[in-house]
Amino acid sequence: MSCLLFARKRPVQVIPIIGVCVFILLAWLPTAYGLTGSDLTIGKMKIAIWPEYDDPGVLVIYDGRFADSSRFPLKTSFFLPKDAVISDACSLSPKGQHFCQLYETVNRGEFNEVTLFLPFPNFYLSFHSYPDESKTGKRAIDYSIRTNHKIATMEVDIQQPLRSTEFNISPAGNETSEMKGFNHFKYTFDHVAGGENKLFRIAYNKKDHLPSVDIKYSRMSGGKVWGSPYDTQRQVKNIIYIIFLTGITGLIALLSGYLYLKRKKKNHEL
């Protein structure tokens, strides 16, 4: 309101003032619905760490739900590896629909903090990390999970790449299983504190640098989505920016027309 009052007093500066007001409004909207979610607790979070699954790097998926759904929508953040290339940063509706969100990345030293707006308490992040640059032979991967929220139950699933041997993880998994030809090593952690680190040291031998599967496209509906083309998400961002700029341009045009007619009427009365 103060922005509009200032604009009325100084009509010559109305265009830059309105632009500033719009940007302030956009920055304020996420927190208008609720506080930022750093103090929230995640009820259950599943983390998949799959080396060389569909890419020479490590596919990582964070899939979970916050315990207190009454606080949503809100803005919160997660810690990801510094070299993470994000495919999806989404909030999931009660019907399982993926609503991909724009996100902001800030360097926090050893990790990057990724902030996004979540309309719903369910979240889904998928990305690739590249901790080991070797192409053939022995692999050594140190993957550290840094929590930014308290987690009631955190499940970690590490998958052994196809055509790999001498696969070893430290610490050892609580449970092993086989699914669709892959060996899985599972961990369960209860009452994980915010800011805690969980380090997994993965070592194996592999004679080729090809991924286990060849996935070029993925769907964004139904059950879990194991990634989507990054170019698609970038195009979505561009569309959102274009819509935003178009709206601002239309608003400025309307205000300019109103001021022009008002001045013309005033001059005519004189």
Image (cartoon, grey):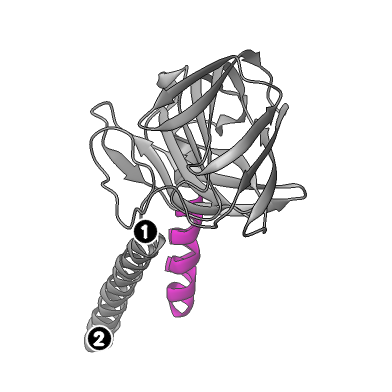
Q: Report the amino acid beneath label 2.
A: Lys
Q: Check residue 23 for magenta coloring.
A: yes
- Left or right, residue 197 beside residue 45: right
Q: Which tag, 2 or 1, sits closer to the chain's start? A: 1
Asked if residue 118 is positioned above or below residue 230 in the image, the reply reads above
Label number found at residue 24: none
Residue visible at 50% across and 27% down?
184
- On screen, 21 above or below 152? below
What residue is shown with label 1?
Answer: 229
Q: Is residue 82 visible?
A: no
Q: Is residue 257 above or below residue 127?
A: below
Q: What span is colored magenta in the figure? A: 1-27
Q: Position of residue 182 (x, y in %)?
A: 44, 33
User: Is residue 11 toward the left or the right of residue 139 in the image?
Assistant: left
Q: Quadrant of the C terminus?
A: bottom left
Residue 27 picture location, percent across and down:
51, 51
The disc placed on residue 264 is 2
Residue at 44% of width from left, 53% of height from top?
102
